[in-house]
Image: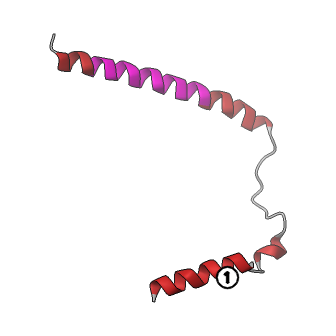
Amino acid sequence: MSIDLLVGILLVIIALIMSYYILMIKLRRGENISNSEEYSGIARQPEKLSEPSEEAIKELEKLIDKLS
């Protein structure tokens, strides 16, 4: 067997093991998420969204200056 074939087989085995562990972690987290509260998408304080903060205004000014 050539070294290329051995390295290829080793990489495939590593990829399969990594995929297995990722799948197991995802399945465990899925059980935890399904037991928790469902996401509603509603803002907790919607009135604060209509008032820009000083930091947001400064960032917007930087972006406008960068574009012009």
Q: Which residue is mark 1?
A: 57
Under tag 1, what secondary structure?
helix
Picture coordinates of residue 49, whole percent (x, y): 76, 74
Q: Amino acid at mark 1?
A: Ile
Picture coordinates of residue 42, whole percent (x, y): 79, 62
Is 1 positioned to the left or the right of 68 in the image? Answer: left
Q: Magenta stretch?
A: 8-25
Q: Quadrant of residue 13?
A: top left
In the image, farthest residue toward the left: 2
| Location of the N terminus (image quadrant) | top left
Is 64 positioned to the left or the right of 56 in the image? Answer: left
Is 24 positioned to the left or the right of 9 in the image? Answer: right
When the figure is inspected, residue 49 is found, relative to residue 7, above or below; the finding is below
Is 18 positioned to the left or the right of 5 in the image? Answer: right
Work out whether residue 21 or residue 37 is closer to the camera in this orientation and state it. Answer: 21
Picture coordinates of residue 67, whole percent (x, y): 46, 84
Work out whether residue 6 or residue 31 is closer to the camera in this orientation and state it. Answer: 6
The residue shown at (75%, 78%) is 53
Give the prevailing secondary structure in the magenta stretch. Answer: helix
| Location of the C terminus (image quadrant) | bottom left
How many discs appear? Answer: 1
Crowding at mark 1 (Cα within 10 Å: few <14, some 14-19, many 20+)? few
Picture coordinates of residue 10, whole percent (x, y): 32, 18
**Residue 33 is covered by the magenta coloring:** no
The residue shown at (73%, 80%) is 54
The residue shown at (24%, 15%) is 6
In the image, farthest residue toward the top: 1
Coloring applied to the structure: secondary structure
